[in-house]
Every structure is written in structure tokens, then in C-alpha cells.
Image: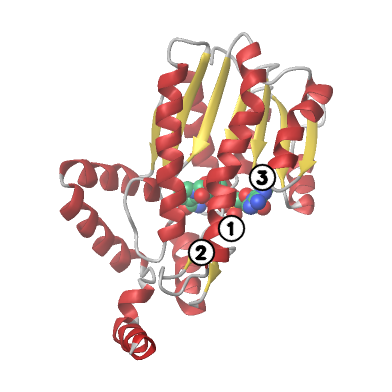
């Protein structure tokens, strides 16, 4: 986009992590904000960190996987701000379960927030974006939207889908004034790992410690996202591991995926819960089916 000053952005998942850092970065560029999250206290905290003067900020406490609430949101945002130029579909959740262990309820929860949240957000706000003189959509996928990772079947399903949705929509919007960036971050130091639903608390604690020590600060991710918006960049990989994972995968789709996973599991000590409990899981399945 040519400018962010005096534009209005709708930003989901604004109560924490990448969302909060992006809100602060947008505010520093003079962009008005409609902040969305299901976490009212976190949202109020984000708003309290923003500069008091010269900015219009509204807070919207809702669940992005709630279709009716999302489709009703543009009217509220329009009443508060008049127009929308930027939509950032950022809210996201994960679980750390092998598919074998994961409940369908948890799978649906991840798809509901990560995929349907993005689809509802885009469906709801596209008319306002099309009506603007210049507009942009940012959809947050993940490097796990490019590489398939054990213990992340629902997350990968959602993030691969966000990638497909975004790439297809970008082609539909090509030549219009509405740009689109799909973002694939690697490890960013946020609350996502701590908030993951997990059957493996020890594995989850390892992952949280790894994120605290080694992941990129969300402020650095936010700065890259804003640069991508400035440049109308269709695709953004954040962190070295995301760039490497993408390269491995494109060069050698099967072998590259496996090598990336092996490295990641080793470096991050990520739970590959089915492999770790493989023998017990297979024995239990055979006993059940006998
Ligand atoms: N942190 C990483 O390493 C990483 C890597 C790749 C992609 N991502 C993606 O980045 C995005 C932001 O996540 P983050 O890392 O900042 O995590 P985070 O947990 O710090 O922030 C996620 C935010 O989304 C909100 N949220 C969750 N479910 C919601 C719902 N149903 N309705 C409304 N809000 C909801 C949470 O309350 C929270 O404020 C997510 O889409 C995530 O999948 C993160």
C-alpha cells in the first residue's frame, strides 16, 4: 500500500503475540485500528499500549470461528471507522497431538479458528476493501502451511488450506486495487505454544522453552509484515527455518519434507507423539480391532 497513515486496519488475534506487535507497528505508522480477539483482557492491554493521541481504536471481543459474529462485524467497524483498507487475518491456535490421539473436537477447533476465521474474515470485509481506493489482505499461514509436521495434522491442514485459499484469491484479485500477502512464519516467540491443547505436557513444555530461547521476537515479524504490505508482496517467509523449509520442500517434495521434519524434531525436540509411542499405539489398535 502507498501509505498506512489515516488508513484503517482490521486485525484479528490482536490480544497477543504477532497480532499485538503488528497493532503497535501499525499505530506507529498512523493507521487506525479495529482490534479483534476473543480475549477481552488481552485486547484491552494491547489498546492501552497504543499512543493515546491521533488514533481511532475500536475493540471487538469475539470468536473468529463464529460465522454470525464475523459477518456482523463489518457494520460495527464501519460505524466506528467509516472505511476499511487493511484486513489482517492473524488469530490462530494449535494443538500438539498425534492424529491418532487427537479428538475430532480439537481438530474442528483448530480448523474453525485458523481456516474458517480467515474465510469468514475475508468474506465479511471484502466488500469494504473493494469499495476502498486502495486495500490489502494479509493472511497468516505458517511454514507448517508448506511442510507437513508430525503432531500438527490439524494445524498443517488449516495452514495449508490458508495458503491455497490465499493463492487462489490473490489470482482473483490480480489487477484490482486489493493486494494480498500470505505469510509463512517459522518460530516466533509468542503464546501460541503455551496455549496449545496437548496430550503431552512434557513435550509442550519443551516446545515452550525452545520458543522462549530461540524464536524470533514478534516485533521483528510485525516489521516484516508491514514491509510486505508496503511492497504489495504476495508471499512472505519469516525466519531462516521458514526459508530453508520452503526450499527443501520445493526442491525435493518428499525427501525434503522428511529431512526438514527430522531436523526440526531434533532441534526443537518437538513431540512426534505417534512415533514416540508407536509400539504401544499399534498394539492397542490391534487389540481393539481383534
Ligand atoms: N508463533 C509462531 O511461531 C507462529 C509460527 C507460524 C505461524 N503463526 C501464526 O501466527 C498467528 C498469530 O499467532 P501468535 O503466534 O501470535 O500466537 P498467540 O497465541 O500469541 O496469539 C494468538 C491470538 O489469537 C487469539 N485467538 C485465538 N483463538 C481465537 C478465536 N477463536 N477468536 C479470536 N481470537 C482468537 C488469541 O486470543 C491470541 O490473542 C497465528 O495464526 C499462528 O498460527 C505463529
Residue hosting label 1: 109
Secondary structure at numbered mark 1: helix
Residue 182, image x and y in percent?
A: 44, 33
Residue 230, image x and y in percent?
A: 50, 20
Q: Residues within 10 Å of mark 3 (few under 14, many from 20)?
A: many
Q: Is mark 3 within 8 Å of ligand 1?
A: yes
Q: Residues within 10 Å of mark 2 (few under 14, many from 20)?
A: many
Determine if residue 125 is in view: yes
Find out whether the residues at labels 3 and 1 contact each other: C-beta distance under 8 Å. Answer: no
**Occupied quadrant, residue 18:** top right
Find out whether the residues at labels 1 and 2 contact each other: C-beta distance under 8 Å. Answer: yes
Q: Considering only order in the chain, which callout, 3 or 2, is on the residue closer to the N terminus?
A: 3
Q: Considering only order in the chain, which callout, 1 or 3, is on the residue closer to the N terminus?
A: 3
The label nearer to you, 1 versus 2, is 1
Determine if residue 191 is in view: no
* Cα–Cα span, label 1 and label 2: 9 Å
* Cα–Cα span, label 3 and label 1: 11 Å
Q: Measuring 35% from the left and 75% from the top, which residue is drawn there?
A: 274
Is the C terminus in the top left, top right, bottom left or bottom right quadrant? Answer: bottom left
* Cα–Cα span, label 2 and label 3: 17 Å
**Relative to 227, does residue 139 appear above or below in the rendering?**
below
Q: Measuring 37% from the left and 88% from the top, which residue is drawn there?
A: 284
Residue 145, image x and y in percent?
A: 39, 46
Residue 78, image x and y in percent?
A: 78, 22
Residue hosting label 2: 95
Q: Is mark 2 within 8 Å of ligand 1?
A: no
Q: Which mark is residue 64?
A: 3
**Occupied quadrant, residue 73:** top right
Amino acid at each position: 500500500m502507498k501509505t498506512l497513515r489515516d488508513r484503517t486496519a482490521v486485525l484479528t488475534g490482536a490480544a497477543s503475540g504477532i497480532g499485538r506487535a503488528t497493532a503497535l507497528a501499525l499505530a506507529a505508522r498512523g493507521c487506525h485500528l479495529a482490534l479483534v480477539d476473543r480475549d477481552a483482557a488481552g485486547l484491552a492491554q494491547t489498546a492501552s499500549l497504543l499512543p493515546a493521541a491521533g488514533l481511532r481504536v475500536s475493540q471487538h471481543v469475539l470468536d473468529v470461528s463464529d460465522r454470525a459474529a464475523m459477518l456482523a462485524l463489518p457494520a460495527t467497524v464501519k460505524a466506528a471507522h467509516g472505511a476499511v483498507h487493511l484486513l489482517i487475518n492473524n488469530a490462530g491456535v494449535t494443538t500438539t497431538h498425534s492424529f491418532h490421539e487427537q479428538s475430532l473436537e480439537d481438530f474442528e477447533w483448530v480448523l474453525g479458528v485458523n481456516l474458517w476465521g480467515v474465510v469468514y474474515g475475508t468474506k465479511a470485509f471484502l466488500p469494504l476493501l473493494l469499495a476502498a481506493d486502495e486495500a490489502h489482505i494479509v493472511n497468516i499461514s505458517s511454514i507448517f502451511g508448506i511442510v507437513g509436521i508430525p503432531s500438527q495434522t490439524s494445524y498443517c491442514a488449516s495452514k495449508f488450506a490458508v495458503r491455497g485459499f490465499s493463492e487462489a484469491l490473490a489470482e482473483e484479485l490480480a489487477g484490482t486495487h486489493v493486494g494480498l500477502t500470505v505469510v509463512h512464519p517459522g518460530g516466533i516467540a509468542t503464546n501460541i505454544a503455551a496455549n496449545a491443547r496437548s496430550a503431552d505436557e512434557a513435550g509442550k513444555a519443551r516446545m515452550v522453552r525452545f520458543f522462549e530461547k530461540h524464536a524470533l521476537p514478534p516485533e521483528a515479524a510485525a516489521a516484516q509484515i508491514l514491509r510486505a504490505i508496503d511492497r504489495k508482496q504476495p508471499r512472505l517467509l519469516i525466519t531462516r527455518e521458514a526459508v530453508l523449509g520452503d526450499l527443501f520442500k520445493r526442491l525435493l517434495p518428499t525427501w525434503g519434507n522428511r529431512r526438514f521434519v527430522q531436523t526440526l524434531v531434533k532441534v526443537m525436540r518437538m513431540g512426534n507423539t505417534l512415533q514416540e509411542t508407536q509400539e504401544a499405539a499399534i498394539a492397542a489398535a490391534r487389540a481393539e480391532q481383534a
